[in-house]
Amino acid sequence: MDIVNGVSPPYVYLPLIERKELLIGPSLVDPQVLNIYTDPKYWITLTSKQVLAIRKAGKGLFKPADPNKDVNESSVAKLREISLYSGNVELELEYTRKGPKAIFDPYEGFTLRSGELGRIIYYSGGSSDKRIEKAYYDRDLLAKDAVTYLHKGGVNVYKIQQLLSVGALGYRRKLVATRWSITAVDSIISSTLLDEIKNYPELNEYYLGESYAVGNRIIVMLFPGKFYYEMMESWGPFFGNKNPKVAMDYEGFLGRTSYAEEVEGAYYAARYSVAKYLYEKHRQAKVVVLLEVDKNWIPNLGVWRVREGTELALKNVIKFGDERTMIDYAFSRTYTLKTSWLKSSFFLRQKTLESFL
């Protein structure tokens, strides 16, 4: 056994290796990036390479974990306790050396050390949050209700994602891979907001918001009408293809009952930011989101860039006099050809055809 000391933001990560083995462990972060290591709102102002450098400054010791059986195992329980805190936490860990190489998890740009986590000998620091403590100690509160309570109470969405991942919320608690907890929280919060939004007055004008950051261009179009949401994703520019197959998922006023298989987690990340915007504006609308990834993006650093990019796009929307002018403007801003977008879109194809009638 060996001993390692370090500082965590705090951040506990649960990677799913090759979609089979769940691991759990704390991040130990270089002090130079400690305060920005878990801050996607800052990352969105950087380049992809700069974000990758920050993520690589965090390393962790991990141990295998069974999602259901190990939720109350001693070291897992301590990691959960660490996750409840805000502010930096000092750690002393015991680990076993098993191999000479580190593992890089491409999903969030996180480096896993080759040693396996043993005991958590000691931890100190951080500060408690009464909102989090209330949700944590209320074992009768369903996970969905706990997530909603924390979000309405102003707890950072990224903190909520981690709390769900480490099994700190809900009635029947279990460990959840970080990638799945991220999507679950985005889905829960946006669905809850949309239940209220669908009772709001309909938007009666045309608006478009746009952002470009970390190699991702996001365009959000808002149309008058009852709530409808469609998201398309193009990786054509990344592969040098101007006429790619564009991924698309959508939902109507009644929502959807199945997972967004084509756009996947990005669908829910963008929907989260769209729902927040409509909720704050007290309006419902038909919404189409275009996501175009280009050569400046380094793949697989997570869907945070969609959540933050969509929010950024909606901060400065432009008003248009009619839908055709707005749609044409949106297409003019992308590298992907108009025909590729229209081929995949239900809503925009319909609107474009209607304009010629």
Image (spheres, rainbow, N blue to C red):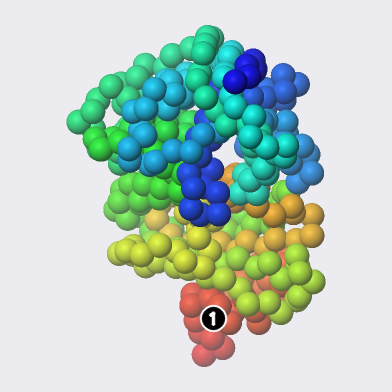
Residue occupying the point 33% across, 37% down? 69
**Relative to 100, is 170 on the left or the right?**
left
Residue 357: horizontal and vertical position, in percent?
52, 90
* Quarter containing the N terminus: top right
Give the residue drawn at x 58%, y 24%. Answer: 95
Q: Is residue 227 above or below residue 152?
A: below
Tag 1, which secondary structure? helix
Image location (x, y in percent) of residue 355: 55, 83
Question: Looking at this view, is 82 or 192 the one in front?
Answer: 82
Q: Give the answer, above or below, for where 180 lies relative to 252.
A: above
Closer to the camera in the image, 5 or 57: 5
Picture layout, residue 295 above or below residue 138: below
Residue at numbered disc 1: 349
State left or right for residue 109 relative to residue 18. right
Q: Residues within 10 Å of mark 1 (few under 14, many from 20)?
A: some
Please name whichever residue, 115 or 39, is drawn nearer the observer in this view of the structure.
Answer: 115
Position in image of residue 171 (x %, y %): 24, 35
